[in-house]
Amino acid sequence: MSADLTRNQALVMKTLSGAGAPLSAYTILDRLRDDGLRAPLQVYRALDKLTEMGLVHRLESLNAFVACAHPNCHEQELIAFAICENCGKVEEFSDQVVKDRLDGWARNHRFKAAKTTIEIRGDCGRCEVKS
């Protein structure tokens, strides 16, 4: 954990790092009430900064957050997440072939992408075996 984090940022980061699944801002707030966080704005400010620092990702489809699984992923132009709809496990990855295809499409359509995030939802291997 970075020494540059504020107390609130460190608390939010620790909560996300210890979670087994993505957490909403309000779930984080509920878990941190005993640590003195009382207002949603405290959590949102910490999440914004942690996201800006590349330590946390927001999963748009879930409106939830996860700790970054790969320390240098923020240097990638494409980040993908496989989200298990059964157990909530999230796997973060990047794929150069997919990135190259999307870059080609963007070039051909004169589209300048600022950021690309892909979310794949389904069942992870462990849950698929159980069914």
Image (cartoon, helix red, strand yellow):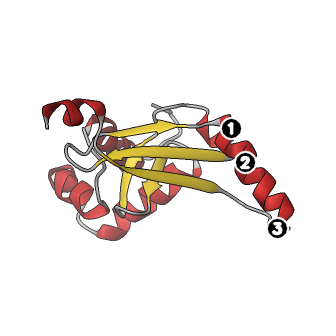
- Three-letter amino acid code at disc 3? His
Dot 3 crowding, Cα within 10 Å, few <14, some 14–19, many 20+: few
Residue 73 place in picture, x, y as percent: 60, 37
Q: Is residue 94 left or right of residue 83?
A: right
| Of callouts 3 and 2, the N-terminal one | 2
Q: Alpha carbon of mark 2 to alpha carbon of mark 1: how far? A: 6 Å
Q: Nearer the viewer, residue 94 or 1?
A: 94
Q: In what element is the residue under mark 1?
A: helix
Tell me what residue is drawn at x 62 percent, y 42 percent.
Answer: 74
Residue labelled with disc 3: 109
Tell me what residue is drawn at x 58 percent, y 37 percent.
Answer: 94
Residue labelled with disc 1: 97
Dot 2 crowding, Cα within 10 Å, few <14, some 14–19, many 20+: few
- Three-letter amino acid code at disc 2? Arg
Name the mark on residue 101.
2
Pointer 3 with pointer 2, Cβ within 8 A: no
Tell me what residue is drawn at x 14 percent, y 32 percent.
Answer: 130
Q: Is residue 4 left or right of residue 102?
A: left
